[in-house]
Amino acid sequence: MQKYYDKATLSSIFSTYSNTVSEDSLEQLAKKTIYKIILSKDKDDFPYVNIATKNKIENNLTSTFYKNESRDKAKAHLKAIFEGASNLFIYDKYCNDNSESVESFAKECFPKKELNIFYPSLKGSFDQDLCGALKQICSNWKIQENKDQKINNQYKDLHDRYIIIDNQIQIIFTSGIDYLMSECKDFTYIVRTLI
């Protein structure tokens, strides 16, 4: 899936330099932009970002909430993303320590319909109390250990917390689910496509 900036964003990025003719190289001009990159269809070394292939530098959707700032918009956004989901893989190695936050998050944001909720087999696995609490929220939810070794290996011993939706969308919680549900610290989440 190609990601492009709209006209307003590009105008904002290049507004200072839009009417300037320059003898600078493309690389020198890139240093004068906000993002310091050059979009390319064939080059991949920095400052080039190859838009024809997957690249480590991506255009993703990000939202940050500061301490004491309402998370209602984030919760509404995540609820909308989860609405059509059939499968959720949740990696949060602190989920059992913060089980009340995980339960509140699921109750508020997960769709009340048939839904497979997977957790990793090692660190981040759900204890029986958390599994039982989630089943009480919605009896149509199937809470189970993830058996996909590729995913288990990819999401092992990571710092951030992740939710994978139908193997198509990845949501990264930089501070964990706990700070989505609490306003006592800052919270950032990133939504990126996996396809």
Image (cartoon, grey):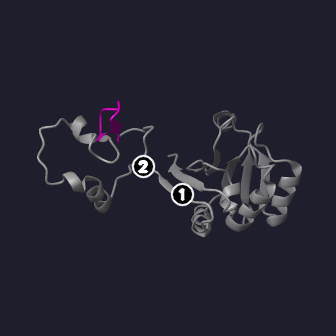
| 113 or 34: nearer the viewer | 34
- Residue kind at label 2, given as amino acid type: Asn
Residue at image coords 52%, 46%: 194
Residue at image coords 58%, 64%: 74
| 116 or 98: nearer the viewer | 98
Residue 142, image x, y percentages: 78, 55
Quarter assignment of residue 140? bottom right
Residue at image coords 88%, 53%: 129
Q: SS of the residue at dot 1? A: strand
Which residue has dot 1 on it?
64
- Residue kind at label 1, given as amino acid type: Thr
Q: How crowded is mark 2: few (under 14 residues within 10 Å), some or many (20 or more)?
A: some
Residue at image coords 43%, 44%: 58
Looking at the rendered image, the disc whose residue lies closer to the viewer, 1 or 2, is: 1
Q: Does the magenta stretch include residue 95?
A: no
Which residue has dot 2 on it?
59
Which range of residues does the magenta coloring cover? Answer: 39-51
